[in-house]
Amino acid sequence: MIISGKKISQEILGELSEQIKKLESKRAPCLAYILVGNNSASELYVKRKVQACEKVGITVKSNCFDPDVKEQQLLEMISSLNLDPTVDGILVQLPLPPHINVQQIVEAVDPQKDVDGFHPFNIGRLLLGYTPFFVPCTPLGIHELLMRSSIQISHKHVVIMGRSNIVGKPLAALLMQKNTHTNATVTLVHSHTVNTAQITSQADILVCAMGAPLHVKSDMIKKGAVVIDVGINRLHGKLVGDVDFEKVKPQVSQITPVPGGVGPMTIAMLLSNTLRSYQMKAQLA
Ligand code: GUN
């Protein structure tokens, strides 16, 4: 069976839209983004995020910079967005050009506006099992996808392929937490793992997030497993995941497609985090 992230994300967007309509304040939730340079994939991702915001009633503040922008200029921009009471969420689209220190930029964002959930404060809280202000959007989207597809996580062996700061590491932290809807046994494999296929073949839930087009074949997967494909790769002009979807599909119980799987869930969670930020502020006011 195919898990449609597209369909589930549309349901979530509908729910967010309803919640935003009911807000009593005159001000709508607001997401500010920073986009540096002209990376076409980043431009496309940001465009999708903006379209989704507009659909649910979140206002967007755009801040685009030339590829040779000075780090100081970005830090000043972030500082002013941190102080702006009309901005609920700040998103710095990654990757940044090589002359920019990503760590400095990520750490400059106010953790209470860090709707991407990348700030060490939020990642640290996630790992420790303290409630973070925000959980990174792709791990949160995968969790939501599993929940809404009635896939049990507790007691299951989840194998994650890939150790990125955006997906692999925070997803491992999220799914291993001591909570009713997590409690997974998590194994994380990466480019230096020995006997990767032997490990992935033991997964009840296999999450592929290493960015290698069509890398995961049927002999790496247990019969009846659930497969979540996070990869977005361009191969011969076509968008493909990290999983060889057509060959793998017959032997698994559920699988996400690319496109239309995890991607739209990431966007839905970004909007959800932005509304959460708005609501956290309203509670303090
Ligand atoms: N680049 C790739 N994925 C993401 C994401 O989820 N957020 C940001 N800010 N940049 C990204």
Image (cartoon, rainbow, N blue to C red):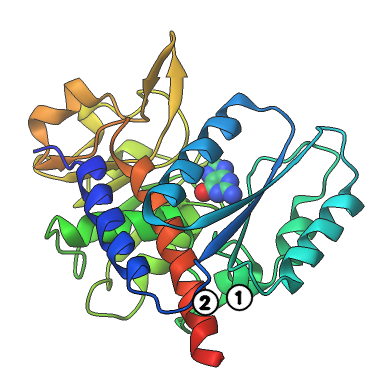
Going from N to C along the chain, the mark reached first, 1 or 2, is: 1
Image coords of residue 231 (percent x, y): 41, 34
Side (left or right) of 176 relative to 183? right
Counting from the top left corner in percent of width and height, residue 42 is at 59, 34
Q: Is residue 165 above or below residue 155?
A: above
How many numbered circles are shown? 2
Relative to 186, is 238 above or below?
Answer: above
Q: State the residue at coordinates (80%, 66%).
A: 79
**Dot 1: element:** helix
Q: Position of residue 276 (x, y in %)?
A: 45, 73
Asked if residue 15 can be seen in this view, the reply is yes
The residue positioned 28% from the left and 71% from the top of the image is: 182
Tag 2: residue type?
Phe
Q: Is mark 2 within 8 Å of ligand 1?
A: no
Which quadrant of the figure contains the N terminus?
top left
Pointer 2 local density, CA inside 10 Å: few below 14, some 14–19, many at least 20: many
Q: Can the viewer see residue 193 in this picture?
A: no
- Residue found at x 18% / y 46%: 226
Looking at the image, which residue is at 55% across and 40% down? 46
Residue at which label 2 appears: 133
**Extreme front residue here?**
26
Q: Secondary structure at mark 2?
A: loop
Q: Residues within 10 Å of mark 1 (few under 14, many from 20)?
A: many
Residue in front for this viewpoint, 115 or 252 = 115
Which residue type carries mark 1?
Gln
Kindly indicate whether the residue at mark 2 contacts the one at mark 1 (C-beta within 8 angstroms): yes
Image quadrant containing the C terminus: bottom right
- Report the disc number at residue 214: none
The residue wearing badge 1 is 112
Q: Nearer the viewer, residue 17 or 201?
A: 17
Specify whether 159 is left or right of 106.
Answer: left
In the image: residue 3, left or right of residue 74:
left
